[in-house]
Image (cartoon, rainbow, N blue to C red):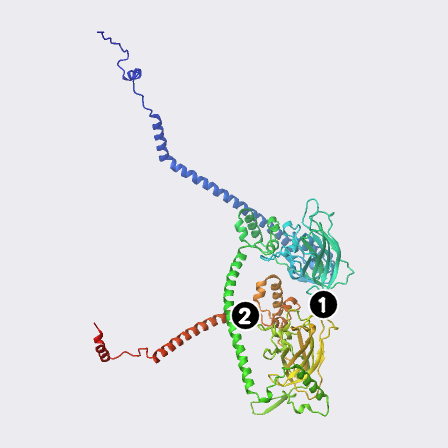
Amino acid sequence: MLPTTHSRNPNRGSDANFIRNNTFGVEEPNTKTTIWYKWISNRIRQYMIPEIFHFICLVLILYRLQTLSNQNDRVLETVNSMQSKFGKMERKIETLVSRKPNQGINAFDNTEPLEQSIADVLESMKSPVQDSTEKMGPIIPQTKQSTSKTAESTFEVSIPKELYRFNAADYLKGASVDNDYSSSSNLNPIIGYDQTNLVLLDRPQPPKRQAWCTTDKNPVLTINLAKYIKPISVSYQHSKWNGAIPNGAPRTYDVVACLDFYCEKWKPLASNCQYSRYESKGTEQICNISSHLDVPLIGKVQFRFRENYGDTKTTCVHLVRVYGETKSPLKTEEKKLRSEELCTDLRWYYHNNFFKYTWTDKSCSLLYNNSCCSECPECCQECLISDYNGTTLGNIVGYTMFSILGAITSLVALFTILVNSMQSKFGNMERKIELLVSRKPNQDMNPFDNTEPLEQSIADVLKNMKSPTHDSTEKMEPIVPQTKQFTSKTAAGSTFEVSFPKEPYRFNAADYLKGASVDNDHSSSSSLNPLIGYDQTNLVLLDRPQPPADKAWCTNDENPVLTINLAKYIKPISVSYQHSKWNGAIPNGAPKIYDVVACLDFYCEKWKPLALNCQYSPFESNEKEQMCNVTSHLDDPLIGKVQFRFRENYGDTKMTCVHLVRVHGEAETPVKIEEKLLKSEELCTDLRWYYHNSYFKYTWTDKNCTVLYKNNCCSECPECCEECSITDYNGTALGNIVGNTILGILIGILSLMFLFLALAALVGCIACCTGNCDVTEEPRSGRRHRAKKRAPYNF
């Protein structure tokens, strides 16, 4: 047995040392990480939440201060510009006030300083954008009076009246492209706004992407000038290019002056004008007009491009100008008070807010009239003639809804008009049947059944009228006596007679504007009186210098007849026919031979020949009226209705087209003509502006032939008179259609209700007649009696 040995531990009294020296001792736990985590968590919870909130608030405050600083910079720029403007105005006012009174009194002694100061002021007032107009100054002085006021007296200063030179083909001054007589271009798409006038927007440098491009073989650009001018020169300017001149740029072109609306008559102004590639890039190249040309004042010109660079199919034109002289300067719109604010906003929208820039009105007229090109040049480079903005979007939505409603109402209106026309046709048939029934047996022969006896009868009557032994007037009673007397009673009971003067008045009694009309019931059916639509038949009676080709009275009848109610009872002198102007041979369908008779009754069953075998000759002038005289007799009665009977036409076609007929005669009293309205000039100017600039307003305005011709609007707007109608489609007509449609719908609903009630009553009557209806309640005794009879059948 081994003895136990006890080792002595020198650190026996220390537990910690014992544990550390023990090989099989327990590890000490790590509590430092836990302590730090708890400390950080408590710190964040107690102190960091308000500090983070304060930090976020500080960031927002700094952002807001930066925004306010930007706004302050904009305000300071606006204030500085306003101060500079006010400073200039104060200096001008001080200059005017500092003048002495004797300067005005001695103005007649020496006019050169005054004229020089006026010229300086005019030059300073010119827009800096229009560089081309600054080069052209006034010339030929004439006398003119100007009045000036001082603090104590007034005086008149004679200032030379001058001819003003300017670019008359500037869109901003009122010029426009006549698309009807120009080549089709990419600036006038089928769907979208017309931007063709960009080729007339006078600016220092036209952009490349806004050119007037066409694929026509012989491109033509027709321009309505802003004012009638005496032409001096024309010019063309291409956009600035790099290297060689672009393909498609005009190389050679001619310019002619249009002497009529259609530019069929023209006079050359400049020939073989060339745009040279050797000149400075993007500069204007002028082509002068000879001063020896005897050219009147013109209002329309036509550019005819003959060659282009590269001989490509597409010709692209950027900017054309037409310089000329006029006696009075053009009226320009004054700059608005808020122009600077408007320009600043547009510039800020362009660079910072695309949506607001798109929604805002930013057309070329707005930008250039407010001089915004210096503030926002990129806006002017990208501007359009008709802008897409919030207003146009609203118009598109409104027009779309209006079109949908219009289509719905039109369908109902067409149904109503169709029913009304059918009722009128049935009414005419009933009247004709009653007339045939009321006739005598010897009146059954219709004079229009065979044309040979009709011609023979007219010839026989004319022969009898020429014979002195045969008195044809004994068989005919005059419709209206030649002398009229009116009897009037006074307050005292006496009567007096007033007789008309016997001096005759000669005029065209078949003029629609004087009161004549076509009797459709006794005329052939024509294209001007459709089944659905307004009756335009009276266009054949609209007396004008040149009838249009597309407003003819055309019929397919074998023996065309045109019956006219004259404006007044007349003694006939002559009849005439005028066809629309033709080129080369006379068109097929034009009348060749016709007769004219006077109707002695309402139905024109009794008639008297006036002119026989009247011929419209192709050897006369193609735009001239050809007369056919009526044989004069002292015993002829006054007539109020005539009938044209067309026997042959050119080409022997089925269709006969009549453009304008006249019946000249004498009357005892002149026809009353309505006086010209006081606002005629304003009305004509508005119609001309609407026609060229606002299709919707022109369509909505009353513009029928009566309004245009009675207000003498044809000189102001000849195209309006060319396209006018007897009954116009406008706002009033649309209102009448809508009103009649609503009334027709109400009448239709009431009629259906009435028919339903009538059918219900009819069914009830039939049921009662057959014994299947309960009329009244039976007495109680009767019901018991019947119940007793039915009792055996109850189980």
CB-based contact (under 8 Å), mark 2 and mark 1: no
Quick check: 259 above or below 666?
above
Q: Position of residue 363 (x, y in %)?
A: 59, 55
**Is the residue marked by circle 1 packed among few (<14), some (14-19), or many (20+) residues within 10 Å?**
few
x and y percent of residue 277 in the render?
73, 48
- Disc 2: CA contacts within 10 A as few (<14), some (14-19) or many (>=20): some
Q: Secondary structure at mark 2?
A: helix
Say whether residue 419 is left or right of residue 504: left
Camera-side residue: 657 or 373?
657
Which image quarter holds the N terminus?
Answer: top left
* Quadrant housing the C terminus: bottom left
User: Residue at position x 38%, y 37% from top?
Assistant: 49
**Residue nearer the viewer, 677 or 341:** 677
- Specify the quadrant of the image occupied by residue 148: bottom right
**Camera-side residue of 527 and 630:** 527
State the separation of the CA atoms marked 2 and 1: 37 Å
Q: Nearer the viewer, residue 627 or 239?
A: 627
Q: Tell me which numbered mark, 2 or 1, is placed earlier along the sequence.
A: 1
Where is residue 728 drawn, in percent x and y? 58, 70
Q: Quadrant of residue 143?
A: bottom right
Residue kind at label 1, given as amino acid type? Asn
Residue found at the far right of this picture: 292
Residue on which disc 1 sits? 583
Instruction: Name the amino acid type tagged 2.
Output: Ala
**What label sits on residue 733 in the rendered view?**
2
- Checking the image for residue 169, the label placed there is none
Residue 160 appears in view: no
- Residue 675 position (above or below residue 373): below
